[in-house]
Amino acid sequence: MTTVSESRTNGRAAATSAAIEMTAATKRFRTPDGSSYTALKNLDLRVERGEFCAIVGPTGCGKSTALTLAAGMEKASEGSVRVFGKEVQGITPKAGFMFQTDAILPWQSVLENVAAGPRYRGVAKATAYRDARDWIRRVGLAGFESNFPHQLSGGMRKRVALAQNLINEPELLLMDEPFSALDVQTRAKMSTELLNLWEQSKPAVVFVTHDLEEAIALADKVVVLTAGPAASIKATFTIDLPRPRVVQEIRFDKKFNEIYQNIWEALREEVDIAYAQTTRSVAPDGKEAE
Ligand SMILES: Nc1ncnc2c1ncn2[C@@H]1O[C@H](COP(=O)(O)OP(=O)(O)OP(=O)(O)O)[C@@H](O)[C@H]1O
């Protein structure tokens, strides 16, 4: 059954620490005119170890900002952000990152790109290359070890990025619309491959997407953010569709539509609010401007 729960964290001890635990996390940015913009306010987000959590919300509401807090790329202005029980300070260790744009190095071959993490950690070249070849095979790129990124398709470059992350055995994978630049078919295929790889090592995943279907097909839990400014969690939906899932097929499960409708109901209100804001002026504190 699909369950809906209001956002809430329960402050469990570090011994049972979640992968991510944000408590009343607030993020304010300085705007170009020198004023302050509150992107997130009092965000309570808990992602369990091994859990696949998708975050959806209207455009500009603060999805990426939530991810950057967990990644340690930005510091919360107020509140607490803990990853594996430790307050985030600087870039979060044990985490992998995948964004819309490729982070692979254009001047390095596929093999060098995938081996980069272990090499950086001081793993011997022969071992790093052996492991990299294994990961290149697991993401379906065997035979392309010597290719450079410009010699690959967009989907292939995403596979390189996945291998580049997974070779480091991350316990947390932070993904910001990683497949949004791909065509629909490649995107669905990559999503299924991501799920297969995730099932093998079960890192916690936070997956930011605009695409509600993608969120439901992938996740154990879908978090809906409210429209900004000062976004917080509107509702959290448990996705109890069977696993393993094939993304191209899970959409035909009869429960899928019911889940979609439930979440869309919550999301649509926020999308409408965000859209209405684009047609009038809203001050950074969320109050309507004169
Ligand atoms: N470094 C920054 N400086 C100032 N404002 C920022 C900064 N980063 C984000 N913001 C603002 O915070 C708000 C949330 O941005 P964010 O990118 O997190 O939203 P999002 O939900 O991921 O957007 P989208 O759906 O369009 O990708 C936006 O209004 C954005 O302009």
Image: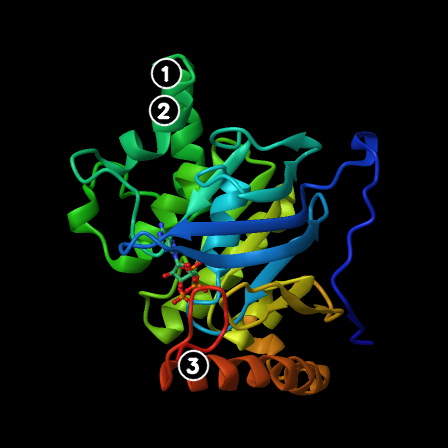
Q: Is residue 233 left or right of residue 186?
A: right
| Disc 3 secondary structure class | helix
200, 38: nearer the viewer:
38
| Residue 154 % position (x, y) | 27, 58
Name the spot of residue 189 as percent of width and height, x first.
45, 65
The quarter of the rendering in which ligand 1 is drawn is bottom left
Q: Residue at x 65, y 87 (%)?
A: 261
Residue 150, x across and y down, in percent = 16, 49
Q: Is residue 7 above or below residue 255?
A: above
Give the camera-side residue of 228 and 225: 228
User: Marks 2 and 1: CB-CB under 8 Å?
Assistant: yes
Which residue occupies 81% across, 43% down?
11
Q: Is residue 252 above or below residue 226?
A: below
In what quadrant of the picture does the N terminus appear? bottom right
Report the residue at 61% width, 37% height from top: 171
The amino acid at mark 2 is: Tyr
Residue highlighted by disc 2 = 129
Identify the mark at residue 126; answer none if there is no mark: 1
Rendered location of residue 174, percent (x, y): 51, 47
The residue where tag 3 is placed is 277
Q: Is any atom of residue 141 visible in this view?
A: no
Taking the image as shown, residue 132 lies to the left or right of residue 75, namely left
Residue under the point 59% across and 57% down:
41
